[in-house]
Image (cartoon, grey):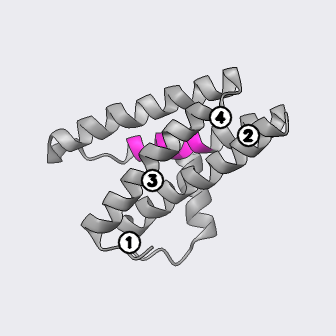
C-alpha cells in the first residue's frame, strides 16, 4: 500500500523527473524532509503530525525497498536490510516520541544521499 503511494506522490509533484537516479535522490531528500517535520511534531507534542510525517518517511523507504533490483548482487540485499532497520527505528521513534531514533535514520540517509550523488553524478 505505502509503496505505490510514495511513488505516486513524487510522480504527481515532479512531472519532469529526468531519470530513475534523480527519483532515488529525491526520495532520500524526502525522507530527510519528512523526518525534520516529525521531529518538530515531537517537540510540539503534536501526535497527529508526528504520526503523519513518520508514516510519510516509512512510505518512501518502503518504496525504496520495492524498487531494489536483486539481480545486481549483494548491495540490494544489504540495502533491503538497512532500509528495514530504518523503518524499525522510525516506528520506535513514533511509539516512544524519541527524536534520537529519527537522528539515527537521518545520519544513515545523509550518508546514502551523499554516496548516491557521488556514484550517479546526480546534481543535488
Circle number at residue 110: 3
Q: Are the two marked residues, 4 and 3, in contact with CB atoms closer than 8 angstroms?
A: no
Query: What is the distance, in whole Å, between disc 2 and disc 3 at their CAs?
Result: 21 Å
* Mark number displayed over residue 52: 2
Question: What residue did someone put label 4 on?
Answer: 99
Q: Residue at 53% of width from left, 28% of height from top? A: 89
Q: Tag 4's secondary structure? A: helix
Label for residue 19? Answer: 1
Which comes sooner in the sequence, label 4 or label 1? 1
Of tags 1 and 2, which is closer to the observer?
Answer: 2
Q: Nearer the viewer, mark 1 or mark 3?
A: 3
Packing grade of label 1 (10 A; few <14, some 14-19, many >=20) is few
- Assess disc 4: are there few (<14), some (14-19) or many (≥20) residues with their C-alpha within 10 Å of its C-alpha: many
Task: Say if mark 4 contacts mark 1, CB within 8 Å.
Answer: no
Q: Earlier in the sequence, mark 1 or mark 2?
A: 1
Q: Earlier in the sequence, mark 4 or mark 3?
A: 4
- Residue 80 place in picture, x, y as percent: 33, 36
Rounded to the nearest angstrom, the CA distance separating label 4 from label 3 is 16 Å
- Distance of mark 4 from mark 1, alpha carbons? 33 Å
The residues colored magenta run 57-65
Residue density around tag 2, few if under 14, some if 14–19, many if 20 or more, within 10 Å: some
Quadrant location of the C terminus? Answer: bottom left
Amino acid at each position: 500500500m505505502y509503496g505505490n503511494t510514495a511513488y505516486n506522490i513524487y510522480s504527481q509533484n515532479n512531472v519532469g523527473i529526468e531519470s530513475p537516479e534523480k527519483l532515488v535522490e529525491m526520495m532520500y531528500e524526502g525522507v530527510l524532509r519528512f523526518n525534520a517535520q516529525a521531529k518538530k511534531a515531537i517537540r510540539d507534542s503534536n501526535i497527529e503530525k508526528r504520526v503523519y510525517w513518520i508514516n510519510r518517511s516509512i512510505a518512501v523507504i518502503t518504496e525504496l525497498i520495492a524498487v531494489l533490483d536483486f539481480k545486481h548482487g549483494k548491495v540490494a540485499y544489504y540495502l533491503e536490510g538497512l532500509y528495514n532497520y530504518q523503518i524499525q527505528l522510525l516506528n520506535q521513534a513514533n511509539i516512544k516520541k524519541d527524536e534520537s531514533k529519527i537522528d539515527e535514520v537521518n545520519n544513515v540517509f545523509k550518508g546514502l544521499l551523499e554516496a548516491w550523488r557521488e556514484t550517479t553524478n546526480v546534481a543535488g
